[in-house]
Each structure stands twice: as structure tokens, then as C-alpha cells.
């Protein structure tokens, strides 16, 4: 097993390298709210600094059992990512990276929060971080995680 930045570990299975790197990039950002959708309920968790993350076999684990919360994602089922900028009802734009399962259902959503200052102006540095990740992964709105 290899130890990576931010207390993260990665097993020897390379079929999830792209997902691993993308989730690591998301977790390295400030003001991220993860939403996990089970279909009938949604759980939300704020990303903390130096949050442990690993993928072992088919399971991605964000956080760990020593924290008040953690998330397990079945990476065998999570097959697509979408980079989404969309208008909100207040006229602002929301920024998120969404993970979908093989049936097209939303599994997890990484919401970039606090994108606007108290005057309602977009914080350009935060928008640039989202755009930097988008560009790093090919500037495509949809990204396949299937190898």
C-alpha cells in the first residue's frame, strides 16, 4: 500500500486511479460539502482539513471510523463524473462535481460552497480552483471512470 498526501492511502489496484486522484483533488479544497444520495435520503458532511481518504479493493472511504462521520463509495458502481455549473434561484451560480452510478443515479455530490462574498460577488480564487480541477481532467462536462 502506498501513502499519499493528506493522510491518504492507495492500494495496488490501479483501476481506480482516476477516481482516486479526482476525489483527492476535491478533498484538498476548502469549503466542500459532500452530499450522499441513497435515493430516499441525503446525508451531508463538510470536508475537514487533512481528512483521511483511501480506496481499498472496490471501496473508497472518505474519513474513518474515528470521526463523527465517514463515507463509503462502491467504486465498482460509481462510473461517471459530471462537472456542473448551474444557476441557482438567487441568481448566483452553483459549482459541484457529481458522481453517478451505473444506473445513472447520483451517488455523491461535492458542492463547492462559500463561492460568493458578503456583497454577493463571486470569489474569483474559489471559482478558479473549480476551473483548475475541471481543466486538469480534460475540460469535459462528463468524465467516465470506467477503464
Image (cartoon, rainbow, N blue to C red):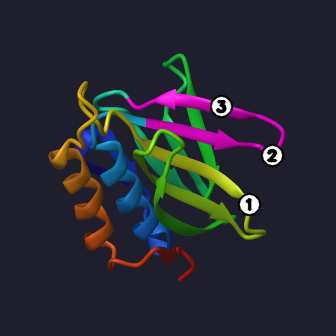
Rendered view: 27 above or below 128: above
Q: Is residue 73 left or right of residue 128?
A: right
- State which quadrant residue 92 falls in: top left
| Nearest to the observer: residue 67 or residue 41 | 41
Q: Which residues are magenta?
A: 33-47
Q: Residue at x 20, y 41 (%)?
A: 123
Crowding around mark 1 (Cα neighbors within 10 Å: few <14, some 14 to 19, many 20+) is some
> Does 40 lie within the magenta span?
yes
Percent coordinates x, y for residue 115 in the rendering: 31, 39
Percent coordinates x, y for residue 21 in the rendering: 35, 61
For label 1, the residue is 105
| Nearest to the observer: residue 49 or residue 15 | 49
Q: Please tell me whether mark 3 sits on a helix, a strand or a loop.
A: strand
Q: Tell me, for residue 39, which label it has, or none.
A: 2
Are the residues flagged by discs 1 and 3 in contact, CB closer than 8 Å? no
Are the residues flagged by discs 1 and 2 in contact, CB closer than 8 Å? yes
Percent coordinates x, y for residue 59 in the rendering: 60, 52
Q: Residue furthest left?
A: 125
Q: Residue at x 50, y 74 (%)?
A: 15
> Does 105 lie within the magenta span?
no
Q: Residue at x 53, y 83 (%)?
A: 147
Q: Spatial distance from mark 2 to mark 3, Cα to Cα?
A: 11 Å
For label 3, the residue is 43
Q: Is residue 59 left or right of residue 15?
A: right
Q: Please tell me whether mark 1 sits on a helix, a strand or a loop.
A: loop
Amino acid at each position: 500500500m502506498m501513502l499519499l498526501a493528506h493522510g491518504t492511502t492507495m492500494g495496488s489496484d490501479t483501476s481506480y486511479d482516476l477516481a482516486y486522484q479526482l476525489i483527492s483533488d476535491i478533498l484538498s479544497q476548502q469549503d466542500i460539502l459532500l452530499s450522499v444520495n441513497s435515493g430516499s435520503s441525503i446525508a451531508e458532511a463538510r470536508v475537514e482539513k487533512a481528512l483521511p481518504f483511501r480506496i481499498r479493493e472496490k471501496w473508497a472511504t472518505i474519513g474513518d471510523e474515528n470521526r463523527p462521520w465517514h463515507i463509503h463509495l462502491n467504486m465498482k458502481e460509481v462510473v461517471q463524473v459530471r462537472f456542473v455549473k448551474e444557476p441557482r434561484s438567487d441568481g448566483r451560480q452553483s459549482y459541484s462535481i457529481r458522481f453517478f452510478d451505473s444506473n445513472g443515479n447520483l451517488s455523491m455530490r461535492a458542492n463547492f460552497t462559500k463561492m460568493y462574498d458578503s456583497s454577493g460577488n463571486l470569489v474569483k480564487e474559489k471559482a478558479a480552483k473549480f476551473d483548475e480541477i475541471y481543466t486538469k481532467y480534460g475540460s469535459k462536462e462528463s468524465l467516465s471512470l470506467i477503464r
